[in-house]
Image: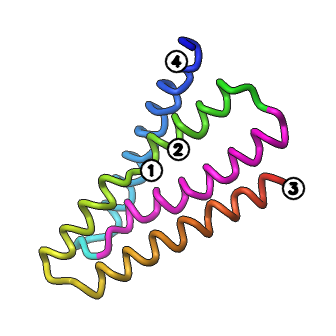
Amino acid sequence: MTKTFIFIFLGGGLGSVLRFSVQQMLHERIVPYSFPWATFTVNILGSFLIGLFYAWSARFNLATEYRVLLTTGLCGGFTTFSTFSNDGVILLKQGLYGLFFTYFILSITLGVIAAIAGGVIGGK
């Protein structure tokens, strides 16, 4: 059990650093803040990756440690539902209701589609 926790820990740390890097890169290029592109990007990409990693883990019969490193660890650290929620609150407080609903619907819909796509691609 301890080995599994270490793999999750390593994946989570790497995922968090990757998320921060993507967010910094996007925030530097998108000014002023309007649509929460950074959070949207990491969540859609992370949804794709988790679908891909689960498909690969089944296809290549990955050990549990590697599966959780990639899914629970890396994808869990990379994606961020709490930031997604906070970005939605910011949009609502700014009175940007149309942008809020666009962000909400696109994030959920494209996240599920990305997870399916990752699973399909990883299963080939």
Label 1 sits on what residue type? Thr
| Between discs 2 and 3, the one toward the N terminus | 2
Q: Which residue is mark 4?
A: 6
Secondary structure state at the residue bearing disc 3: loop
Q: Position of residue 9 (x, y in %)?
A: 47, 24
Q: Which residue is mark 2?
A: 75
Report how far apart the C-alphas of labels 2 and 4 lie in the structure. 15 Å
Give me the disc on residue 124. 3
Asked if 92 appears above or below 74 in the picture, the reply is below
Q: Quadrant of the N terminus?
A: top right
Q: What residue lies at 46% left-to-right and 33% top-to-bottom? A: 12
**Is 79 one of the magenta-colored residues?**
no
| Between discs 3 and 4, the one toward the N terminus | 4
Label 2 sits on what residue type? Cys
Residue nearer the viewer, 36 or 97: 97
**Is 40 one of the magenta-colored residues?**
yes
Q: Which residue is mark 1?
A: 79
Q: What residue lies at 65% left-to-right and 24% top-to-bottom? A: 65
Majority secondary structure of the magenta segment? helix
Report how far apart the C-alphas of labels 1 and 4 lie in the structure. 19 Å
